[in-house]
Amino acid sequence: MAKKTDPATPANLPCGQCGYENEAERVYCHNCGGKLDRSLLPKEEEGSGKTETPEQARKRIAKMTNPKSGGATREIKTAVNVLIYSAILAALFLVTQKPDGVPELGKEVPQRLVSSDLMDAIDSPQPKRVDLTEAEVSGYLQQQLKSKDGGVAGLEFKRAYVNLHPGVIHIGAEESLFGLPVYSGVLYRLEVKDGKFTATMLGGNFGRLAVHPVAMQYLDFFFQKIWGLLQRDRKSMDKMQAVVVQKGTITLVTKGGAP
């Protein structure tokens, strides 16, 4: 192989294919025969008549043949993209996982007629107390929701259930998407203040993925059946003078005085 010329000489023209330093007047590489990019040759500054110095030419050629500028920016962008895709994959994984508190099949359908007991208590002229277990409330929801249409196309409703914790009720649903179980739910804080029943939404979930209450406002199409039932039962809850939610149980006390 022929000896390369001095790389410090500004007239040298590097070959883009093999890197050989060619004389400025060449059109094809003396080493490999590849066509040379003559735009890499030093140029006169527009309107000044000045020619690049050897150092300026070296920097320009190095930048064009092996640019390093923006390397840190590219690395940052790559790292950000990796984090975004990792977060998406982690979220998808959590969505497919079964959340805590899902009861075993059959345990959410007790024999007690909850709707009948509630109506009797509401119609009583005197305040009346109704104590319900988690399983009884789940059975009531199961009966009410299973007969209603709604929800997302492609999802087959399987069952509803509740989890009761001090002051808080989690209303969950299990549906089937092409044979795969899909779990979703809404979390509420229940209380009666100044004689008025309030249900404050604290958020929700898809699988094990928690959803912020602000985001839940834009996901109402997933919970049409649950929220439709809550709106109907809201009138009944407005007739309660006390609602006490404990671990596994809920106590309702009616106002009485019904005509």
Image: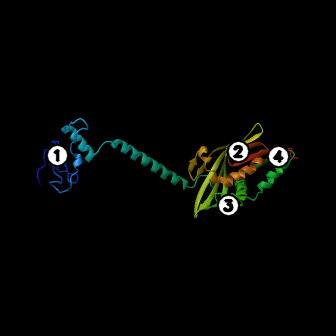
Tell which circle, 3 or 4, labels the residue nearer the N-terminal end.
3
Q: CA distance from mark 1 to mark 2?
A: 84 Å
For marks 1 and 3, give the one nearer the viewer: 1
Disc 2/disc 3 C-alpha distance (Å) = 23 Å
Residue 245's disc is 2
Of the residues under marks 2 and 4, which one precedes in the sequence? 4
Residue 21 image label: none
Q: Mark 2 to mark 4: distance in Å?
A: 17 Å
Of residue 105 and residue 71, the one placed in the foreground of this image is 71
Closer to the chain start, of discs 2 and 3, is 3
Mark 4: which amino acid? Lys
For image coordinates 40% across by 45% down, the residue present is: 77
Sequence-first disc among 4 and 1: 1
Indicate the secondary structure of the residue bearing disc 1. Answer: loop
Residue at position x 42%, y 45% from top? 80
Q: Residue at x 66, y 45 (%)?
A: 188
Q: Say which of marks 1 and 2 sits in front.
A: 1
The Cα atoms of the two marked residues, 1 and 3, are separated by 84 Å
In contact (CB < 8 Å): disc 3 and disc 4 = no
Name the disc covering residue 12, or none: 1
Going by the image, does 5 lie left or right of 158?
left
Is 64 left, or right, of 161 in this rendering?
left
Query: Which numbered circle lies on residue 128?
Result: 4
At horizontal 83% and vertical 51% (from top left) the residue drawn is: 120
Q: Are marks 1 and 2 in contact (CB under 8 Å)?
A: no
Secondary structure beneath dot 4 equals loop
User: Type of residue at label 1?
Assistant: Asn
Query: Gap in Å between the C-alphas at discs 3 and 4?
Result: 29 Å
